């Protein structure tokens, strides 16, 4: 490819000598010459170097546009049974009643393509082509892997036809889009000055070196990812697991799950149509883009801030006074912070937060509107240091910041500056206006595991031969001292001990001490949502997990078991026999979406 621009000049160049500087008295033409080498797009690999995505030959079988077609005979040719051939054709049609003769392409393996070639004379109406396209070697990790934009154009065109503007909410190309420039590499270019005889007379711009596409080595453990997806399946929600020591994301599940190839494969138009129409909106990237109230999980943040500001101590006791706020279960008194967390006592944390918002430091003055405004602003400043109400900067194209209310927000919402604690008390138990993303929930667990610091969560641990992006190596500290963060851990450990809200999810029988916090999030539009955050081993954390299951009920019975199984699978590589029935029951529910 040549791009010639006239108007540049310079002296002639003598053979064997370097090109002199151009002389403005002589006219030369600018040319841009594309070097012939075409870069190969880089591969995507998991943390153990298993190839997940690569550019490979793909064989496409074009079915005849005009029926009838003997599908039984075609199935025999390809080695497919009757059910398989019917399913594959149905998956390729954009809608159930597509017109006769709608163009259908089927992906074939190399062996299947060879069978078609051998029988070409008997099947002249079939057209077999070969293309180089992105091939997915795994059925897991769709929300992370994403898609190459040029191959996703049929998906974009389909999505534009669907209601509620989903096209604009669904564009999430995963790491394929985020790291597109590095994966794709770039061609080399020369920029010579050429005289009227075609001789080069120096250059008008620096040459651009050819760059091969670089491989991405992900932080994901693909086996753990596939296992976590088995636990969520068709259920709405998310599961995020990361290594708190590095911020590397080990598993990233957005449910309902789907296969990565569904959005780009030529024979998946029917699958895409169902995904776009599905009432649970599986194409939403829930851990990054959907912020929800965290429920009782947020009691950890409120307790840490209250400790830092001196509103409470680890020994502070509060009565379970249900005239203040209801408590969903009966339990012994919260004689200290550890027991308050262990029993997730709502009245306990109502009074913790009331001390935060109603206090007047260094003064005997009673609670006032000015004090409430100042204290809520201070609370928000400390809470934001946990990476909340802001994007964490994960390496995906879209991420929501979540939300923490400001005093000005309540001035507007309550239509008065004299709102009282009673009108915002839901913040004490993680309800109301607080919204966190799944990434923020998992990062919260990592912060407590690290006793007050974190590396930003990320999905790529190495680009080519280099490490992650520089910003993922920057350590962030909260405004809460490590001693106050550490004071939360005994209560989180007690949550999974006898009498705690998640004692059934303990892994003590295999020698793993888990620290965690359950959450049951009130939902006015249906069943409550189940939440859990935790890390293990509690004394030297290697994995932090956040689970959120919509309309699943109690965090202790729905979310905590999923987190415990992922922890055990990662730390031991297997599930203990005593939990096999438990595991099978969860997987059964995941397959059927309840």
Image (tube, rainbow, N blue to C red):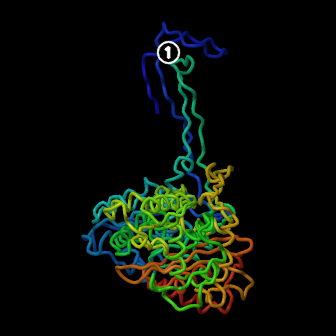
The location of residue 298, given as percent across then percent down, is 53, 72
In the figure, 526 relative to 447: above or below? below
In terms of depth relative to the viewer, which is nearer, 546 or 30?
546
Q: Locate residue 332: give its quadrant.
A: bottom right
In terms of depth relative to the viewer, which is nearer, 371 or 483?
371
- Residue lying at 38% horizontally and 60% vertically, measured from the top left: 409
Any part of residue 133 in sight: no
The location of residue 231, given as percent across then percent down, is 54, 80
At mark 1, the secondary structure is: loop
- Residue lying at 51% horizontally and 77% vertically, measured from the top left: 531
Q: Residue furthest front?
A: 364
- Residue lying at 55% horizontally and 69% vertically, measured from the top left: 302
In terms of depth relative to the viewer, which is nearer, 197 or 22?
22
Residue that badge 1 annotates: 195
The location of residue 446, given as percent across then percent down, is 63, 67
In the figure, 587 relative to 1: above or below? below
Q: Is residue 403 left or right of residue 586?
A: left
Any part of residue 216 in sight: yes
Q: Locate residue 243: give its quadrant.
A: bottom right
Q: Residue furthest top?
A: 25
In terms of depth relative to the viewer, which is nearer, 330 or 578?
330
What is the quadrant of the C terminus in the image?
bottom left
The location of residue 563, given as percent across then percent down, is 59, 78
Mark 1 neighbour class, 10 Å CA radius: few under 14, some 14 to 19, many 20 or more: many
């Amino acid at each position: 490819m040549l791009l010639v621009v006239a108007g540049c000049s310079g002296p002639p160049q003598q053979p064997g000598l370097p090109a002199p500087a151009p002389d403005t008295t002589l006219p030369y033409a600018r040319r841009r010459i594309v070097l012939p080498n075409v870069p190969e797009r880089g591969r995507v690999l998991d943390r153990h170097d298993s190839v997940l995505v690569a550019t490979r030959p793909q064989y496409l079988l074009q079915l005849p546009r005009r029926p009838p077609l003997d599908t039984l005979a075609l199935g025999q040719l390809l080695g497919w049974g009757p059910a398989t051939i019917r399913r594959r054709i149905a998956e390729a049609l954009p809608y159930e009643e597509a017109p006769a003769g709608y163009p259908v392409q089927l992906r074939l393996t190399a062996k299947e393509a060879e069978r078609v070639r051998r029988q070409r004379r008997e099947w002249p109406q079939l057209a077999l082509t070969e293309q180089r396209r992105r091939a997915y070697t795994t059925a897991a990790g769709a929300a992370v892997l994403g898609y190459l934009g040029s191959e996703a154009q049929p998906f974009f065109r389909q999505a534009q036809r669907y209601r509620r503007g989903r096209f604009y909410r669904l564009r999430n190309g995963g790491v394929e889009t985020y790291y597109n420039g590095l994966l794709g590499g770039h061609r080399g270019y020369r920029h010579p000055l050429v005289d009227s005889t075609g001789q080069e007379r120096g250059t008008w711009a620096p040459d651009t070196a050819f760059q091969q596409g670089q491989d991405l080595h992900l932080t994901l453990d693909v086996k753990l990812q596939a296992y976590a997806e088995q636990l969520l399946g068709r259920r709405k929600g998310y599961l995020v697991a990361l290594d708190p020591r590095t911020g590397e994301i080990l598993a990233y599940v957005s449910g309902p799950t789907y296969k990565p190839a569904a959005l780009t494969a030529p024979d998946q138009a029917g699958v895409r149509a169902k995904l776009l129409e599905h009432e649970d909106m599986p194409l939403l990237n829930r851990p990054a883009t959907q912020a929800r109230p965290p429920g009782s999980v947020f009691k950890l943040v409120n307790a840490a801030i209250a400790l830092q500001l001196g509103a409470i101590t680890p020994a502070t006791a509060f009565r379970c006074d249900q005239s203040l706020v209801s408590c969903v279960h009966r339990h012994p008194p919260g004689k200290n912070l550890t027991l308050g967390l262990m029993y997730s006592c709502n009245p306990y944390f109502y009074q913790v937060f009331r001390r935060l918002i109603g206090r007047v430091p260094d003064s005997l003055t009673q609670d006032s509107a000015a004090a409430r405004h100042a204290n809520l602003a201070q609370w928000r400043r400390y809470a934001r240091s946990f990476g909340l109400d802001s994007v964490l900067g994960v390496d995906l194209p879209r991420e929501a910041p979540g939300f923490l209310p400001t005093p000005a927000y309540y001035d507007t919402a309550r239509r008065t500056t004299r709102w009282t604690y009673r009108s915002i008390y839901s913040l004490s138990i993680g309800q109301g206006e607080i919204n966190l993303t799944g990434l923020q929930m998992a990062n919260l667990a990592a912060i407590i595991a690290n006793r007050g610091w974190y590396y930003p969560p990320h999905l790529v641990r190495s680009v080519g031969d280099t490490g992650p992006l520089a910003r993922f190596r920057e350590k962030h500290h909260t405004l809460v001292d490590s001693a106050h963060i550490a004071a939360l851990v005994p209560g989180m450990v007690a949550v999974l001990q006898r009498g705690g809200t998640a004692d059934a999810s303990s892994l003590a029988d295999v020698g793993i001490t888990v620290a965690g916090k359950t959450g049951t999030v009130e939902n006015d539009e249906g069943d409550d949502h189940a939440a859990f955050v935790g890390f293990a081993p509690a004394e030297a954390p290697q994995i932090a997990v956040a689970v959120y299951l919509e309309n699943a009920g109690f965090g202790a019975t729905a979310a905590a078991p999923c987190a415990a199984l992922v922890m055990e699978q990662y730390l031991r590589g297997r599930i203990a026999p005593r939990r096999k029935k438990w595991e099978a029951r969860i997987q059964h529910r995941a397959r059927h979406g309840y």
